[in-house]
Amino acid sequence: MTFLRRLPRPRTLRARLTVGLAVLLAISCAAVGVAAVIELDGFLTRRLDQQLGDVGPRFAASLEHKGKAPDDHDGDEHGDDRRQATGTFGARLVDGTATNAAVVRSTGVRDVTLTAEDRRRLAGIPADGDAHTVRLSTLHSYRVLASKGLDGDVLITGLPLEPVQAAVHRLELVSAIVFGAALTLTGVAGALWVRWSLRPLSRVAATATRVAELPLASGEVALPSRAPEDDPRSEVGRMAGAFNRMLGHVEDALTKRHASEERLRSFAADASHELRTPVASVRGHAELALLHPGPVPPEITRALERIAAESSRMGEMVDEMLLLARLDAGRPLERRPVDLTMLVLDAVTDARAAGPEHRWTLDLPEEPVTVPGDAHRLHQLLANLLANARLHTPVGTKVTVTLEQTDTSAVLKVHDDGPGIPEALQPGVFERFTRAEHRRRPGAVGGGAGLGLSIVAAVAEAHGGEVALESRPGSTTFTLRLSTG
């Protein structure tokens, strides 16, 4: 069983069908061959037993009297009893001991020297009138018949099994050659037939492969031509028809989704663009009112300050939504060499100034790291990552920023030893407006609108890079990879 488990298994349906046909044919050929060999062996053995019965004990009886049959034996009264076929064996046993043994050769009768094992085997042959097979050391296999003589001795006559075995072996060889050739030809023909029969299925699989390679998750997608439908009454034909109907439903759904996403992007871009002016106006009037030289009640001053702060926060949110809308629309970014090392240094300096209660650590390589991209958007990406670590961790958290360069990419890691991001929140942490119901831990200094990390992922994707998260209690790491080529 272990050997069978280690055998390579065919993976494709075509290979499985071909191997299955070959195995069934091999089993059938083996069954026919074994049955033919067994039947031939039995038939020739019965014929040999019949010849033994016809020969009788005359040759064995004549061994005692040198070719003359006495009156108390079944000898031939007309002369020499040794006129037997070449290879005939004879032996006479007295009191269970072989006293005489000889075999007929083409040159005459020759005595046979028996070993102790041969004598034991001959003595064990029952005189029951049935033929038995015995193997002698000098004569190989014989079919022998034991009968009781008139004077109480046992007479054994045998004929060689060699002709029977030779015929059986020849049949085995011929069967192996014929069945092997038939199995080979049938296997090749079966493989061609299976391949021809499964051509419609192969075309359906090719169509499915082309569909699977399409970027169905983004943008408008034109599905390839449908799979050919041959005979709708066949299993493959019904499957091709169902597959084509499924492709039609998928295409309709993708078209509707694309149109809905386009309308949503257009709305977000238009709304963000239109909101910038009134938000800026509200902020400007609030700041202007705060500059009024006359006396203003404290509660009015506090209200104006809150209006200015909230309008400023709303302005940032509008800018972020407008940026995401532009990135969704696929607008190209600048592709200039950017000193990422300097950007990281500036971003950490700004973060340290904004969050002095945190412990900031910077690990930069000795040589500057340069990547192609948009310096402004990359700075915004870094600022959002650091702001996320600052706003969502308690005071005193250590934040470590590491920049490394490999052969093909720049790797930036932002690690903090805060309480970590909840496991349920991690799969959607880069989605828009994703916010935890609670801070990572009481004592976190603030939060945003849930767009910061979505901007990080969008900017990284626009630069051909990727960002990943690993978080557990006491360790949170954001890893950004950007191509340096």
Image: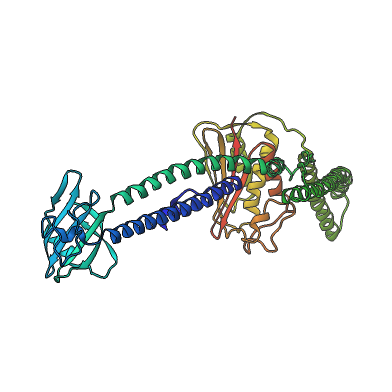
Q: Which of these two is toward me, 423 or 445?
A: 423
Taking the spot 70% from the left edge, 56% from the top edge, the residue there is 447
Is the N terminus in the top left, top right, bottom left or bottom right quadrant?
A: bottom left
Judge left or right: residue 116 versus residue 181: left
> x%, y% of residue 329?
79, 39
| Residue 67 placement: quadrant | bottom left
Q: Is residue 455 above or below residue 38?
A: above
- Give the tally of numbered discs: 0
> x%, y% of residue 360?
55, 48
Q: Is residue 253 above or below residue 68?
A: above
Q: Is residue 447 above or below residue 342?
A: below
Is the C terminus in the top left, top right, bottom left or bottom right quadrant?
A: top right
> x%, y% of residue 188?
55, 39
Judge left or right: residue 282 versus residue 349: right
Task: Say how the picture is coloured.
Answer: rainbow
Taking the spot 77% from the left edge, 35% from the top edge, the residue there is 331
| Residue 142 placement: quadrant | bottom left
Judge left or right: residue 221 versus residue 49: right
> x%, y% of residue 358?
58, 53
Quick check: can you spot residue 244?
yes
Quick check: can you spot residue 466?
no
| Residue 199 placement: quadrant | top right
Q: Which of these two is toward me, 383 or 312?
A: 383
Q: Which of these two is toward me, 135 or 75?
A: 75
Q: Is residue 39 above or below residue 227?
A: below
Taking the spot 50% from the left edge, 36% from the top edge, the residue there is 365
